[in-house]
Image: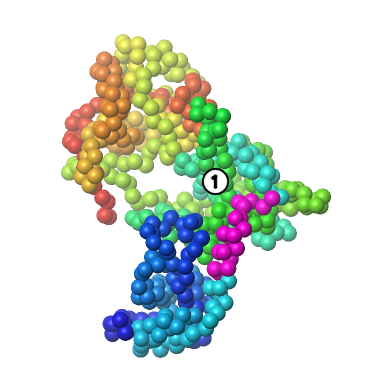
Amino acid sequence: MTALPNTTKSRLNKIIQVPGAVWEGDRRPLGNMASHLDLGLEVDGECIIWVDGSEGAVMAMDVVAEDMGIEAVVRTLLRAIESPHHPGQPHRPQKIVVRDREIQFFLRGALQGLDINIEYSPQLPLIDRLFESFAEMDSEATTALPAVYQDAIKEVAGKIWDNAPWELLADSDILRVELKNCEIDEVYLCIMGMMSAEFGVLLYRSLDSLKQFRAAALGKNQSPAELEKAFLAQDCWFLNYEEVESQSGWMETPEIEPFFGSLHPFEGMRPFLDEEEAKIIYAVLESLGRFCDRNRSILAQEPIDFIAKSYRITLPQINDRKEIISTKLSTLPELTQELLNIGMSDYSGEITEDIDISIQEDLIPDGSLITLTSLSSDIVKQIQHQNKTYHQPVDIAPQEEELPTIFIQTTRPKAKYLIDKIKEIGGLKSVCFNPGEDLFSGDSYNLGLLQTGDEELFIFAEYSQREPEYTKILQQWHQGCKKTQGYCIVIVAMGVTGNNRGNPQLKDMLALYEVKSINGSDIGMGVLELMPNFD
């Protein structure tokens, strides 16, 4: 290839050329960096990178196989011009500098007619520094946390786990933490866990980043690539928790291990913190723990009022030198409402046949544990007479001792939300298991559906027909419902993250619904087909 097609050059010439804009470009072996990346390459990889020297920003970067032709350098360059990494804007540079003569001569031929000077230099300062930092990170085997904070920050993370702020705060209940004598004046906290199965704290360095990610995450018909791009464009530190198998035996409960890191549009995800970052995160998490401890009753209210509290946080000592950071933590009711108004996901995951029935999957909270079982009539009577348990009766009086029961176990805030939501839509009317099939994978399944008082259907579980265990459970369920003339029970319980996970006690049961078990044909359904939603 000696030059670009005329149509391509015409398109590129319509893009503004910035006077004085100088870009550096290079293609270098990944070396040890490849071991940290899941690239799926069968041969050694190389990194193609274009950097705007005047802005100090990476415009585009690709990882390619070592045997990929030099044309790949041009492809990455054209993407840098037309669709640069955020927050860069499309533009043509006035000059390009490379350190490889072959690339220089190739670009001179390929870019004819674009009015871009192609020059050679043995050093590329920006790219050299970037790759030197990669090499330093690899050679030093950077630890996740600086030594002085290694124990202290893990201890405060353990307190946060025990405190469980996600039982009080949804991901829209943003908190602001103001800091004195730090490299950053304020951060915005987003607590994860109330409406998802992942627990943790995001510390946004920018309010705009928080808003942009929420808008992108809730956007309509987002592809996995678009969601990944939005995820990596965040500007925040994070604390997450993961389960680690206990070394004391396979029967032991998995241990919870905190891990920290940073997200930034230029850095991507970085799984370690430097000392100044650890200092800020330690002070913020210590403030969050105190704030939730001392304001639990207020935070349990809905909506949460404005609260502002100040703290003096003593940092782990360095060389016997005592350092204190002053913080101020406050709720942001107006911002919470603004984020809620950004919108809920337009994807309803509808699975329908050619019938006028809407089937949705946004009723059951994420992370809920669904169990099909049976309860004795004596236990059911005890639950019915508990003052704190909401009870929805039905005009059926079963004579059986064992009553078919569906448990929906979640956290207390999510359980309360679910109970209130069911009240709003007319209570629960019936339970239905209906066959379905995925035309793309060929899988067959049984969908568990809840019918509400307003005739809507909501998915609460999906059971593969390939799994003998599920088949047996559903057979037992249908047999139990046959004995009770269709009478069954749905119980909403809390405690999914505690010791009673999978085995809720009486005190955990917050709502009991007596309903009928029906067949899909009773409401006009046949075999459901999973179809993509293109709207």
Question: Most prominent secondary structure in the magenta stretch?
Answer: helix
Secondary structure state at the residue bearing disc 1: strand
Residue 167 in view: no
Magenta residues, start to end:
130-147
Q: Is residue 217 depicted above or below 77 in this figure?
A: above
> Which residue is at a point 45% across and 27% down the rendered structure image?
502
Quadrant placement of the C terminus: bottom left
> Which residue is at a point 71% across and 50% down the rendered structure image?
148
Q: Is residue 505 depicted above or below 193 in this figure?
A: above
Q: Is residue 195 depicted above or below 182 in this figure?
A: above
Q: Position of residue 438 (x, y in %)?
A: 23, 43
Is residue 343 toward the left or the right of residue 292 in the image?
left
Q: Position of residue 439 (x, y in %)?
A: 20, 45
Q: Which residue is mark 1?
A: 240
Residue 145 on the magenta segment: yes
User: Which amino acid type corresponds to the residue marked 1 in the rendered image?
Assistant: Asn
Q: Quadrant of residue 273?
A: bottom right
Q: Position of residue 188 (x, y in %)?
A: 59, 54
Residue 507 in view: yes
The color scheme shown is: rainbow
